[in-house]
Image: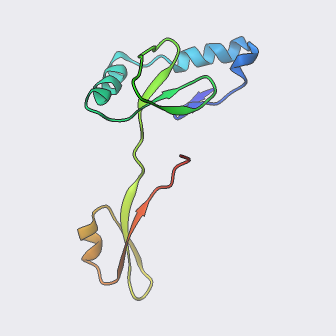
């Protein structure tokens, strides 16, 4: 079955019609969602294509075949700052200046993705 991040299910290449039907339902983005992705591509954001193998791949120049593929704006890794006080208290902040306002060591944290 599909989930919010991509297709999770059986082998589509094996001709499993239930999985093929689930895949087609997953591809049904609303017109608004399609426009958002295409406008992001227009301003230079990276676009990823989701294929039947279950992978999101960076698309250099999308062909916008919405009937066969899904597209999304490449997610940006989560970034935030932490401040560790001399007593070991950890404070999470979303701006560097905010983290530096505390007494202690300021560290920038960035999500590690599977790329």
**Vertical placement of 48 versus 13: above or below?**
below
**Vertical placement of 102 versus 50: above or below?**
below
Give the residue drawn at x 47%, y 16%: 28
* Total numbered labels placed on residues in the image: 0
For this rendering, which residue is in front, 59 or 23?
A: 59
Q: Quadrant of residue 37?
A: top left
Seen from this angle, which residue lies furthest right?
A: 14
**Vertical placement of 93 versus 13: above or below?**
below
Give the residue drawn at x 42%, y 50%: 77
- Residue 83 in the image, given as x and y percentages of width and height: 36, 75
Give the residue drawn at x 42%, y 41%: 75
- Residue 79 in the image, given as x and y percentages of width and height: 38, 57
Report whether 91 appears left or right of 95: right
What colouring does the structure picture have? rainbow
Report whether 69 appears left or right of 96: right
Report whether 94 appears left or right of 74: left
Q: Quadrant of residue 32?
A: top left
**Vertical placement of 95 versus 58: above or below?**
below
- Residue 35 in the image, given as x and y percentages of width and height: 31, 21
Seen from this angle, which residue lies furthest front?
A: 60
For this rendering, which residue is in front, 3 or 78?
A: 78
Q: Quadrant of the N terminus?
A: top right
Give the residue drawn at x 53%, y 27%: 50
């Amino acid at each position: 079955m599909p989930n919010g991040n991509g297709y999770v299910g059986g082998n589509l290449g094996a001709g499993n019609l239930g999985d093929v039907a689930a895949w087609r339902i997953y591809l049904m983005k609303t017109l608004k969602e399609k426009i958002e992705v295409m406008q992001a591509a227009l301003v230079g954001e990276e676009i990823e294509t989701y294929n039947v193998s279950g992978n999101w791949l960076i698309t250099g120049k999308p062909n916008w075949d919405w009937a066969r593929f899904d597209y999304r704006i490449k997610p940006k890794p989560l970034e935030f700052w932490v401040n560790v006080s001399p007593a070991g208290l950890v404070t999470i902040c979303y701006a560097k200046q905010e983290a530096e306002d505390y007494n202690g060591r300021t560290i920038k944290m960035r999500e590690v993705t599977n790329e």
